[in-house]
Amino acid sequence: MTPTLITKTARHGLALTLAVGLGAPAQALELYSNDDAHLNADVLAVYGLFNSRKNYDGTTGGSTWREGFVKYGLSGDYRLRDAGTAYGAFALVSSGTWGDGDAGGNSTGAERTTKIEDAYLGWRSGELFPVLGKDGVDVSAGRQQVRLGRGFLINDDGANLGEGPADGALNRGGAYYLAARHAFDRTAVIRLGGTDGLHGSAVWLKSDNRAQAKTEMAAGTLDYTHALGTLGVTYIHGLEVDDRWASDFQRQRDGMNVYSLRGEGSLGVPDTTFAFEYARQSPRSASERTAWYAEAAHSFSSAPWTPSVTYRYSRYSKDWDLLFTGQSTGYGTWFQGEVAANYSGPFATNAAIHHVGLKANPLPNVTLGALYYDINSVSTGAAPDLSARELDLYVEWAINQHLIVTPLVGLYKPDRDAQSGGNQVNGNGTNVYTQLVVAVPF
């Protein structure tokens, strides 16, 4: 069967992003170590409680559900004397959803599975090519995550739909919001030049995700990194989709070209970061589409609690294909609004979004945050009209390096309800959304 167009995608890697962001390093249990070799056991367990007073799938009464996953495996590296370092990883993920299923109807609460997540090998050149710098050649292949730039176009294969859409044909086994599964099924990646000066990459990737029509793509990046920041370009070419799972919209990925210009850095301004990306998609049999954002962030490093503020404007044209975007640097990138980006929409298409983010650290291991989104449909003639406002308040508390607790409350107010051209059931009043996520990394 060919499912209807699925544009929904889920947040990826929340727990691991929080672990790194709160100062807890990527965790591993060291099994073996000497000057030439390391072998680690990698374990990450995440559990979440969720409630939404209103739904976005045509059902009434709201939803209460639970999600969880455990990722467990091995990773290691081996120094090949003066010929660089070999590295690799293998991991499984066991996941599930319980209760009503999520507020967007992407899961039913009956999803459970265990599957291979990571399985890759790689080689870094060390000092073998001095002109390219240390580890100036990095080659890897297998089942792994691939990110280009800040993840605006390609961040991961993190869409984790459950049994809700397409009569369960797109089910990946639970944890729709937590979305532990993010590795592409098959990849080959070459990175040249390290991270400073002129450097770039060549990428081939293939998804095994039916919700992504098992898309196959090739991509390349070229970047120049200076003390002031990084300026780069990205090129992506669609190679193939699986017609058994592709919608008419997704079939346009076959032969599609995507170009982007992006930048990120301080530009010499202390405690400040600027970022932008402008991208254009050129499908074979459809008109061109664009998406772009511009962002500025400033940290008041000498003030109590070291507060920071971020402003970003992003715009996605009508029929923009969100490709493999995903969460890359924390809340709001690139899932803008906990309700809007995960359950209601828009899902990185037909939207102009003003975003303001505030953060503060009352303690070294505690972050308080507030995220505001003003979302407006670009084409008001498109159905549904998903214009809305959303405010998310959250706490990130790293109790210790093996326990991270993150409560969040979201207030979501759409302009329209399901009876007037939107999709929120039981009126366009403010929806109160709550979640509590607990992560245990080792």
Image: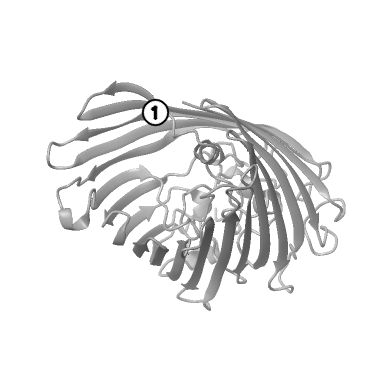
Asked if residue 341 is positioned above or below residue 120 in the image, the reply reads: below
Residue 46 image-quadrant placement: top right
Q: Looking at the picture, which amino acid does disc 1 mark?
A: Gly
Looking at the image, is 100 positioned above or below residue 330? above
Query: What residue is rendered at 46% in x and 50% in y?
Result: 156
Question: Where is residue 432 drawn, in percent x and y?
Answer: 80, 44
Q: Nearer the viewer, residue 5 or 153?
A: 153
Q: Residue furthest front?
A: 302
Q: Residue at x 43, y 44 (%)?
A: 183
**Left or right: where 369 falls relative to 291:** right
Q: Position of residue 342 (x, y in %)?
A: 65, 49
Residue 6 in view of the camera: no
Residue 49: x %, y % from top left: 69, 32
- The answer to whether residue 241 is above or below residue 16 is below
Rendering colour mode: one colour
Res 108 → quadrant: top right
The residue tagged with tag 1: helix, strand or loop? strand
Q: Residue furthest left?
A: 82
What residue sits 43% from the left and 58% below the top?
A: 149
Which residue is disc 1 drawn over?
73
Name the side, left or right, on which 189 lies relative to 16. left
Tally of numbered discs: 1
Is residue 80 among the parts visible in the rendering? yes
Q: Dot 1, crowdedness within 10 Å: few (<14), some or many (≥20)?
A: some
x, y percent for residue 138: 26, 49
Near-viewer residue (379 or 332)? 332
Residue lying farthest to the bottom in this orientation: 287
- Residue shown at the point (67%, 45%) measured from the top left: 369
